[in-house]
Structure formats: C-alpha cells, structure tokens
C-alpha cells in the first residue's frame, strides 16, 4: 500500500514588491518541479500589500487578499508566512510574531528584522516548535546560510568575510572603471534604482552590517549582535584613493569581516584594501561574495547576485522547499537558548595599513613622517612618491602589520610635523 500523498504546503506572502512578486512567479512557473522535489504541492493561498490596485506583473487573482499582514499571518489556510515587506519594526515584526504564535513557520528576506530582533524571534519560534528561515536576508541568491548552517556544520569557523552590499560594490567599481567621483556615481545608482529608500542603509554600511551580524551568529554560536559591528560606509572613498590603491596592487571594497579572536568577537564592516588578484579584489559591479574559512574545509568562496527579483526569490524558495520537505533546523544552527552572549573585541586585530598623504616638497619632510610613524610603533613596508610640479606631492605608504590604535596615534601626530597638507587617509589592508 502506498503512503497517502502529503497535503499541499500553503504559502501566505506579505509584500508584493521585488521579492514577493519574484516568489509568486517561481511558484507559478515551477509548480510541477516544486511538487516533484518536495513530494507535495506548494501553493499560494493569500497575499498582502498596501495597495491592491497596483499593477504587479503577476496574476494574483486566485489568491485571497489581506490588507493587514497580521491577518494574513494568522489565516487558517496559511502554513508558511513569507515576510517580504521589510523594516525591523511595525508590520514586519508584528506579523512575524503573530505568525509564529499562530503556529506558522516563517520565511523572511529581512536582514534588518533579524539583525535587530533575531534572538527574540528565534527563541519565540523554537519555544513554539516553529522554524524561521532567512536565506534571502544575506547575500541574496547565494545560499550562504545553508552553507554555514549545514554544509560546514562540522567545522570550527575561523573567519567569515565578504562583500555583501551590491550597491556599494557597484559604486566603487564604477568609480574606478569610469573615473567618476563618488557623488556622480551615487546619483547614477539612485537613477538606476539600486539604492534603498534610505540610501544610508547601503552607503553607510548598515545593510551589509546587518548581514554580517547574522552570519557571525551562525558561525560563532553567539547571539546576533548588530550593535557591536564596527561600521563605516564608503562616503569618504575618493577616486584618488581608488587609483592610488590600484597603483599599490589593491582594490578598495566595503568589506565585512567577522572572526572570533582571543580578545573576543570582532565584527567589522568598513572600507578595506584587498589584493587586486584575490577573488574579492576581482569582484565587479553589484555582485556579492562571501568567503568562509573553516578548520577542516579551509577557505571557500561563494559568489553571486546579492539582490534582484530572481536571485532573492530563489533564496526564499530554497527555504520554502526545506519546509515542504520537513527539514527543520534551529534558527542560527544551534538552539537559540544555547547561543552565547558575545564578548565584543575592544580593538581590531593588527593589520597592514595603506596611508596616503600629501607631503610638502622640502628637505627632511619624509624623515619627519617616518619619525612620527616610528614613534607610534608603525613600521613602513613599502612607499611610493609621485612626481609632481607643485609644492607638495602624494606619498603612499604600506605599513607592516600594526594596530588601529597605533595608526590613529600616528595620524593624529602628523599635522604637528608641518610637512603634511590636508588630512591623511588611512585604510586597513585585509589579508585575504
Ligand atoms: P519592495 O519592492 O519595496 O516591496 C515591499 C512590499 O511590501 C510592497 O509590495 C509593499 O506594498 C509591501 N508592504 C510594505 N509595507 C506594508 C504593510 N504595512 N502592509 C502590507 N504590505 C506592505 O521591497 P523588496 O525589495 O521586495 O524587499 C522586501 C524585503 O526583502 C526587505 O526586507 C528587503 O531588505 C529584502 N531583500 C530585498 C532584496 C532585493 O533585491 N530587493 C534582496 C535581499 C533582501 P505596496 O507594493 O502596496 O507598496
Ligand atoms: N541594498 C542591498 C544591496 C539589496 O545593494 O546589496 C540586497 O540586500
């Protein structure tokens, strides 16, 4: 006697924008494939968005419409609540909590929600025997949550790093290839619709910081700690620095790095130099890349589209298919109640630094700079001075490994030498 077929998995989708409509299209286009792979039909029963009259590029006529996402989340004919509205408070949070309390599983693409409330939502879900999945929240179409939680579960993770905001990588690479200043390319990105409604989420490093904090929780078994991510955006990166860094063999990236050190958990999302020949250095345009280092696997590199309708909906559907197949895992790879309170590292690990300064052309000027660096404990590895017709010339210095504090001390002391014009630039060089 063959087993009775499994009941359909019924989806309720809150949010019919880029991601939500992408999910609708996959469910409609691949109904047979989804059913064959999961052993049961995967169907949409109800949807929600603010404006019912909007043209949405998909046929929604067979689905119930709820104007209130909380009402959608608690409907009897919804098994999985898909939250693709965005925002870390208000409807996204309320509806997610309501869905869990009503016995639904949740799939979300919302990194802000998880970065701010991941721990309490995970505790709520696990206490109720429910599951929250969020593959789309980090690096769009790249299955990095699955890689860390499942494929690499046998590894102690040493370091997770990557380029996790496509808009910033687009801006930095476009500045380089077109030789355009930051403000011009920022405006271009706005015209192309790449920027979030609040652009500071992108260029201020916040969106990427949200993603890094989620990866760090899984990698190191700690509670999500977005507040302790060291954040700096790309606003101070000039076309000069991109060119000069290139002359020294580097690219500038908004790079996230999370590692557990003897001093505690280090989480940084800051502009860094990486070797131009490295996978991260070669990453162009809006693409994302996540590099994971495990004690057994070594280094693996995942690369792909970090945003957009298809890639993000692909990640949401990966989570839906896990639920359809009955795969249930703790939210962050181990029970939420067992996640440790992270001890944030007070200072970042030592690293080489790139310094750019405008040095006056007079006897002893370079010696004075070298003295200031030496007194701060900063040792020079390489240096380059450019030919010039003015009273000052750009000088680039690559240091040996040093601490951020030593660099700060040196930078603060340089004006007193009276041989440096303007503000020197210091950027960390990440060893990748
Ligand atoms: P979006 O295009 O702006 O769409 C948001 C949708 O949510 C809209 O349909 C909107 O309704 C609906 N919505 C907003 N507030 C609502 C409310 N109070 N009640 C009901 N519906 C509401 O956003 P998106 O780009 O799809 O992003 C959705 C989520 O995915 C966000 O958390 C985002 O960070 C994440 N994400 C997006 C991408 C991407 O490439 N876009 C990638 C990774 C993750 P109306 O259409 O009626 O205004
Ligand atoms: N604003 C984000 C980016 C969208 O540019 O990568 C995907 O999270």
Image (tube, rainbow, N blue to C red):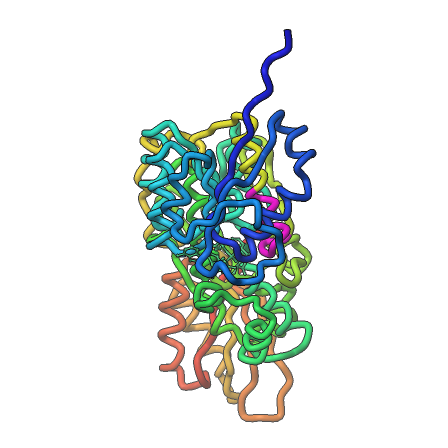
- Residue beneath the point at 56% across and 29% down: 8
Query: Residue lying farthest top?
Result: 1
Quadrant showing the N terminus: top right
| Depth order, front residue of 18/239 | 18
**Left or right position of 185 against 222:** right
Task: Tell me if I can see residue 219 in this picture.
Answer: no
Q: Is residue 312 magenta?
A: yes
Viewer-nearest residue: 190 or 65: 65
| Rendered view: 64 above or below 350 | above
Q: Is residue 417 visible in this depiction of the protein?
A: yes
* Residue placed most toward the observer, 199 or 240: 199
Is 298 on the left-hand or right-hand side of 96?
A: right
Query: Image point 56% across, 85% down: which residue?
Result: 393
Q: Residue at x 68, y 40 (%)?
A: 30
The percent coordinates of residue 339 (x first, y second) are 35, 34
Q: Is residue 45 above or below residue 245?
A: above
Magenta part mainly helix, strand or loop?
helix
Residue 221 in the image: x percent, y percent?
40, 35
Query: Does the magenta portion include 393?
Result: no
**Looking at the image, residue 151 lies above or below residue 51:** above
Name the spot of residue 315 as percent of width and height, x first.
58, 44
- As rendered, which of 374 and 344 lies closer to the eye? 344
x 36%, y 82%: residue: 416
Q: Position of residue 279 (x, y in %)?
A: 66, 53
The mark tally for this picture is: 0
**Quadrant position of residue 240:** bottom right
Q: Which residue is at the far bottom?
A: 390
The region drawn magenta spans 305-316
């Amino acid at each position: 006697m063959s087993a009775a077929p499994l009941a359909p998995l019924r989806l309720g989708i809150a949010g019919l924008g880029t991601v939500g409509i992408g999910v609708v299209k996959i469910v409609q286009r691949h109904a047979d494939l989804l059913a064959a792979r999961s052993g049961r039909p995967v169907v949409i029963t109800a949807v929600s968005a603010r404006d019912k009259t909007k043209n949405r590029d998909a046929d929604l006529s067979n689905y119930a419409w709820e104007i209130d996402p909380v009402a959608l989340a608690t409907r009897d004919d919804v098994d999985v609540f898909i939250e693709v509205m965005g925002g870390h408070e208000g409807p996204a949070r309320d509806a997610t909590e309501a869905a869990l309390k009503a016995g639904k599983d949740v799939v979300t693409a919302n990194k802000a929600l998880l970065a701010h409330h991941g721990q309490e939502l995970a505790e709520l879900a696990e206490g109720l025997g429910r599951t929250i999945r969020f593959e789309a929240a980090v690096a769009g179409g790249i299955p990095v949550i699955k890689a860390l939680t499942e494929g690499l579960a046998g590894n102690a993770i040493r370091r997770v790093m990557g380029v996790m905001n496509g808009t910033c990588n687009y801006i930095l690479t476009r500045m380089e290839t077109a030789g355009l200043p930051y403000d011009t390319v920022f405006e271009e990105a706005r015209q192309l619709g790449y920027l979030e409604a609040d652009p500071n989420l992108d260029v201020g490093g916040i969106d990427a910081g949200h993603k890094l904090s989620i990866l760090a929780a899984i990698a190191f078994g700690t509670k999500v700690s977005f507040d302790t991510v060291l954040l700096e955006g790309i606003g101070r990166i000039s076309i000069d620095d991109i060119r000069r860094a290139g002359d020294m063999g580097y690219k500038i990236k908004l790079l996230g790095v999370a590692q557990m050190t003897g001093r505690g958990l280090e989480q940084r999302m800051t502009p860094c130099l990486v070797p131009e020949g490295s996978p991260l250095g070669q990453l162009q345009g809006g693409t994302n890349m996540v590099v994971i280092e495990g004690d057994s696997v070594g280094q693996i590199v995942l690369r792909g589209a970090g945003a957009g309708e298809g890639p993000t909906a692909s990640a949401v559907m990966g989570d839906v298919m896990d639920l359809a197949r009955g795969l249930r895992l703790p939210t962050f790879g181990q029970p939420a109640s067992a996640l440790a309170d992270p001890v944030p590292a007070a200072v970042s690990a030592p690293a080489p630094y790139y310094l750019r300064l405008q040095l006056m052309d007079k006897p002893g000027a370079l010696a004075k700079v070298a003295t200031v660096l030496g007194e701060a404990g900063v040792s020079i590895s390489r240096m380059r001075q450019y030919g010039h017709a003015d009273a000052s010339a750009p000088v680039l210095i690559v240091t040996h490994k040093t601490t951020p504090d030593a660099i700060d001390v040196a930078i603060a002391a340089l004006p007193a030498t009276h041989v440096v014009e303007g503000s020197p630039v210091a950027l960390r060089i990440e060893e990748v």
